[in-house]
Image (cartoon, rainbow, N blue to C red):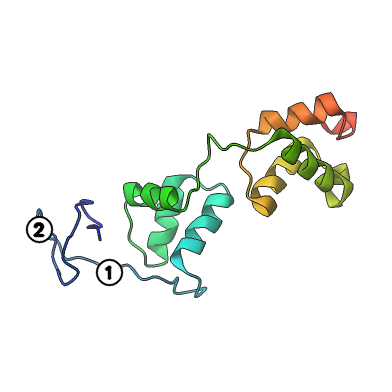
């Protein structure tokens, strides 16, 4: 467990105060008060929606979960969620783009397709990669590349 004030590691589960600063420890609740979802699911949902890290921290604080930015980044790392450096096969991405275009996204531009990849499929790729597929492969009609 870690202190929510200074991020110092607390070795005793029975401790009520942070050793370096004497601040009272706040026990993290494992579920969100409003939705009843596990905290990790709430964090993952906010991450996939594209919220910046500091916004996630403030939204969690409004819901009663006090967390430092460093703690959030560690939780995201534990959940294996990251915005950059994801390795996906181009063929897999192209297949998902084609599925989106064949369905509801037929008239959508590449930014809408990119956003759908993030929200529906939890795939974080650069927007330029989706635009590249759209231009070179002619997946999306020419007039919708703006």
Q: Is residue 37 left or right of residue 92?
A: left
Query: Which part of the image, by quadrant, shows the C terminus?
Result: top right
Residue name at image x 42 percent, y 66 percent: 63
Q: Quadrant of residue 28?
A: bottom left
**Callout 2 secondary element:** loop
Q: Which numbered tag is attached to residue 99?
A: none
Estimate the x, y position of residue 102 in percent, counting from the top left: 88, 47
User: Which residue, given by chain and number where applicable, does mark 1 sit on?
Assistant: 27
Query: Which part of the image, by quadrant, shows the N terminus?
Result: bottom left
Q: Quadrant of residue 39?
A: bottom left
Regarding residue 11, the answer to whether it shows in the image is yes
Estimate the x, y position of residue 37 in percent, counting from the top left: 51, 71
Q: CA distance from mark 2 to mark 1?
A: 15 Å
Q: Which numbered tag is attached to residue 19?
A: 2
Regarding residue 146, the answer to whether it shows in the image is no
Q: Quadrant of residue 143?
A: top right
Estimate the x, y position of residue 100 in percent, counting from the top left: 81, 47
Residue name at image x 42 percent, y 52 percent: 78
Q: Is residue 123 left or right of residue 96?
A: left
Q: Residues within 10 Å of mark 1 (few under 14, many from 20)?
A: some
- Compared to residue 113, the image places residue 1 above or below, namely below
**Callout 1 secondary element:** loop
Q: Residues within 10 Å of mark 2 (few under 14, many from 20)?
A: some
Residue name at image x 52 percent, y 51 percent: 47
Contact, mark 2 vs mark 1 (Cβ under 8 Å): no
Estimate the x, y position of residue 70 in percent, counting from the top left: 33, 46
- Compared to residue 86, the image places residue 6 above or below, namely below
Near-viewer residue (64 or 79): 79
């Amino acid at each position: 467990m870690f202190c929510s004030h200074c991020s110092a590691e607390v070795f005793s589960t029975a401790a009520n105060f942070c050793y370096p600063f004497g601040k009272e420890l706040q026990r993290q609740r494992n579920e969100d008060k409003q939705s009843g979802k596990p905290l990790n699911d709430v964090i993952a949902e906010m991450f996939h929606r594209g919220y910046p890290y500091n916004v996630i921290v403030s939204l969690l604080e409004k819901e009663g979960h006090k967390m430092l930015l460093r703690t959030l980044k560690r939780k995201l790392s534990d959940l294996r969620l990251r915005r950059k450096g994801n390795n996906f096969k181009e063929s897999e991405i192209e297949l998902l783009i084609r599925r989106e275009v064949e369905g509801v996204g037929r008239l959508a531009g590449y930014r809408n397709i990119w956003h759908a990849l993030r929200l529906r499929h939890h795939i974080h790729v650069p927007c330029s990669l989706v635009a590249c597929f759209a231009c070179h492969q002619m997946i999306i009609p020419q007039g919708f590349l703006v």
